[in-house]
Image (spheres, rainbow, N blue to C red):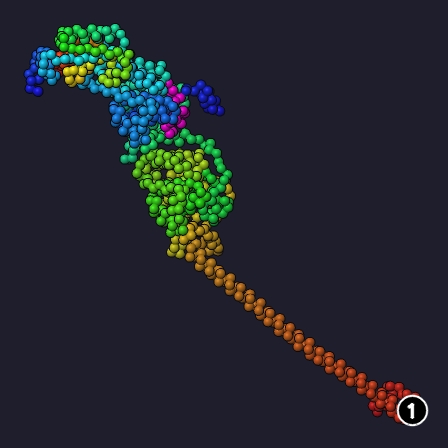
Amino acid sequence: MKKQDKTKQRPLTLEEVGRKSGGVHDDEKWDLRLYIAGQTPRSLTAFANLKRLCEEHIPGRYKIEVIDLVKHPQLAAGDQILAIPTLVRKLPQPLRKIVGDLRDTEKALVGLQLRPSRE
Amino acid sequence: MPRSTVKKVSGNRALPKAPTGIQGLDEITSGGFPRGRPTLVCGSAGCGKTLLAMEFLVRGATQFGEPGVFMAFEENTHELTQNVRSLGFDLDRLGRQKKVVLDYVRVEREEIQETGEYDLEGLFIRLNSAIESIGAKRVVLDTIEALFSGLQNEGVLRAELRRLFRWLKDKGVTAVITAERGEGTLTRRGLEEYVSDCVILLDHRVTEQVSTRRMRIVKYRGTSHGTNEYPFLIDEDGFSVLPVTSLGLQHTVSNERISSGIPRLDSMLAGKGYFRGSTILITGTAGTGKTSVSAHFAHAACTRRERCLYFAFEESPGQIVRNMRSIGINLQPCIDDGFLQIHSSRATVYGLEMHLATIHKLVQKFSPRAVVFDPVGALLQAGSSQDAHSMVIRLIDFLKSRNITAMLTNLTSGEDSLERTEVQISSIVDTWLLLRDVELNGERNRAMYVLKSRGMRHSNQLREFLLTDKGVDLLDVYIGPEGVLTGSARSALEAREKASTLATQEHAERRQRERDRKREALEAKIAAIRKEFEVEDAELALVNSQESKRADRLQQDRREMATLRQADRPADAPRSRNRAHV
């Protein structure tokens, strides 16, 4: 917990994020799942935004799974999806959900815990 | 007349409705919730919204062949399944039979970060997939307001909710949406704005420490509905609403007569007893034998092999059976044979509505031909006088509509006029028996009379009411120059009267005897005189015969003498006689 307090003053480096989320290695895998409903402009925007974020912050260590609920509606219940689009960070733990098209990069980073919230 | 025409018209193009299967609710909504439209059920916490929605769904699935989807936002499926199991709903089984789908939607604000634009398509897809999976006709969203706590963008939420309700309508599913009651508004989040076809308000009130649940239809577009607040009840059989105030006076009447169990009372009631389906009120001061009359009635019903339900608010079943055995009415066999059920509960245990609901349910379950409330006045303690009054009326209406003979007893306190009943129900009962004390010569006796009995020529006489070890017995009271007498005064007077009758009788007999004796004496005398006369007669006859003999002799003698004297001609009798005398 002490470590966390220290790191709060400045943006986290990726390594620190990895450590904080329980991982110890820089090559920790990020398992992301993006729920969409059909190829709507909003879904496409969300996917593009996500891709950009990942490339910028965790290049090469992420996996994005896009789930189209129109095709697989039964998958909506598993991750308690209400809003579309929703990004679910399966790994690293804990599970996080980000709702929306990720247009606001700052909020998206906070949501993914790539950046601490400003509270 | 215009009223009925309106009814007819609205009946012709009435909204299609989805019956809820909930006791009473279908009656006040005249058929159920609007089919294919959303219905909003709102109320404060703990007033039974979820249960109402769940019962609507389960009954739809089990009774009306309409599978349903329950989307829960507050309880998870496990909790929900457990909670309604106590009501006899087996959601696991219904789930396996593909009749009900439970879907728990968890909304946790801490887990959700919002960034950018979104919509609730995920919810739509989930709901749609659940509906499609079993071909659901009914949907419950409980409580969709939870979304407001999980998602920040209220603008998006409201737009999406509007879309959701539109979508549900287009889907043609009958939906029930529950919502928390807000301060001064029907729902906290103003959902009534979106769901406006039917709004039902549930309420849970505590008055004088007695809680009652009530339901009201705030709005029901395109249909007539009851506008009152209706009490409802949640118990092991689920929801039941009591729409009884809406009962009319159209019940069919019976001409059949049934015995009161007391032969003399039957004869006071034009010889045949009560009318079936009528309401009998027995009032009286304490200890005048109201329960005994009721027990007779119950026993008589059971003897006729009719079921009887006995609601006791003051005594336990065991106590009633024991006490009635002491006057020769054995209720135990009736109970054992299943013809009699005694339900004892203190009137103050719960509110009036609960009592009413319990009574309704028991009546529906047991379907008795006769019901006894002993005493109905005890219910007063469970609510205000006004409530109790309307409740008793509702009760009577309900029983009449089912042609059940009801017997109510009521205690009148000494100070009140005897003809006043606490709940003022006297005007709606058909037969009113009044039991009273007659205090005279240091003793207290019971008397009974029929104060009124609609539709029959009943006796107008006061009867002395005796509790013997063979049950209630009615005796004629003594009405004489000294007024109406009962008890020992009556028997004393009767004895005195008997004695004097006896004395009179003896006197008459004595006189008769005397006369007989006189007659005998007279006859004896007559016989004696006759005898004397006969003797005289006989003597006379003897004298006469002697005389004539003597005369004959004389003549003969004379003739002989003449012969002797050789007279030439026979002397005539007088001459010869004179001669003889000379």
Q: Residue at x 47, y 61 (%)?
A: B496
Choose between B227 and B342: the one closer to the eye: B342
Crowd rating for badge 1 (residues with CA inside 10 Å; few <14, some 14–19, many 20+): few
What secondary structure predominates along the stretch shown in magenta? loop
Q: Tell me which corner region of the image, top left, top right, bottom left or bottom right, holds residue B579.
A: bottom right
Q: Is residue B463 above or below residue B551?
A: above
Please check the rendered image and state whether residue B29 is part of the magenta-colored stretch, yes or no: yes
What chain does mark 1 sit on?
B
Residue where numbered disc 1 is placed: B567
Choose between B311 and B264: the one closer to the eye: B311
Q: Residue at x 32, y 41 (%)?
A: B346
In the image, is B267 to the left or to the right of B111?
right
The x and y percentages for residue A4 are: 8, 17
Furthest residue in direction bottom, as rendered: B565
Q: Tell me which corner region of the image, top left, top right, bottom left or bottom right, holds residue A28.
A: top left
Task: Say what secondary structure mark 1 lies in.
Answer: loop
Q: Residue at x 40, y 21 (%)?
A: B17
Write down the region rendered in magenta.
B17-36
Residue B279 in view of the camera: no
The kind of residue on which mark 1 rests is: Ala
The x and y percentages for residue A118 are: 12, 14
Please check the rendered image and state whether residue B332 is part of the magenta-colored stretch, yes or no: no
Q: Residue at x 82, y 87 (%)?
A: B553
In the image, is B514 to the left or to the right of B240?
right
The x and y percentages for residue B298 are: 41, 44
